[in-house]
Amino acid sequence: MISAVVLDRQSQELRMKLKSIAAASMVAFTALGSHAADTSWGSHALLESALGLTAGGVIFDTFSFSLGAQSSVASSVTSLGPIGAGTYSLFSVGNDGLVGTPDDQGFGAWTYGGAPVVHTVSLAAGNYYYSVFGIASGAAAYSINSAATAAPVPEPETYALLAAGLGMVGFIASRRRRD
């Protein structure tokens, strides 16, 4: 009788260990199946580019950057492999200075997959980030490309030439009225 109780207890302990191992395995496989990365580009250069790789699962990556002046920003995301529900969005970082909080303002949300499409927006100086989302059914990759061109600032000579030209037109118009 004692040996049956000991065997039953050992069996219960073995089942508990197997359950623990199974739970740990599920957590490990879930972690392997998701991909999240936060990348900071710092001050946006003329061209920024990144490559995201995954063995499968959910992709949720952010790419933050700052602009020192008003700029035209063009971006695209290209998928390589089986990525479904692929979207990427552009946000400004809110007053709290944190990425992904409710006070962030969205400037656009686009899908990706297939032929790359370039999306262009005009942004003021400030802090921004791209959020890339997708669900990969196997090994896959994507590339994000972003180009920023600062808006031209007129030089003082430009205004001087404009004033001189308007002065000449005014002088000629007044002379013609006299004649």
Image (tube, rainbow, N blue to C red):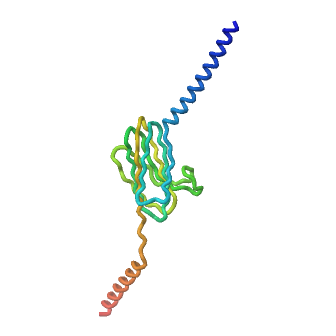
Q: Quadrant of residue 148?
A: bottom left
Could you say which is closer to the camera, residue 105 or residue 96? 96
Left or right of 124 in this view: 14? right
Taking the view exactly as shown, the residue that stands out farthest to the bottom is: 179
| Residue drawn at the location 64% of the way across and 19% of the way down | 13
* Quadrant in which the N terminus is drawn: top right
Q: Is residue 56 above or below residue 149?
A: above
* Quadrant in which the C terminus is drawn: bottom left
Q: Position of residue 108 (x, y in %)?
A: 45, 52
Q: How many marks?
A: 0
Q: Is residue 34 above or below residue 74?
A: above
Q: Position of residue 51 (x, y in %)?
A: 42, 47
Could you say which is closer to the camera, residue 141 or residue 71? 141
Taking the view exactly as shown, the residue that stands out farthest to the right is: 2
| Residue drawn at the location 35% of the way across and 83% of the way down | 165
| Residue drawn at the location 51% of the way across and 61% of the way down | 126
| Residue drawn at the location 42% of the way across and 65% of the way down | 150
Taking the view exactly as shown, the residue that stands out farthest to the top is: 1
Q: Position of residue 75 (x, y in %)?
A: 40, 54
Q: Position of residue 138 (x, y in %)?
A: 41, 35
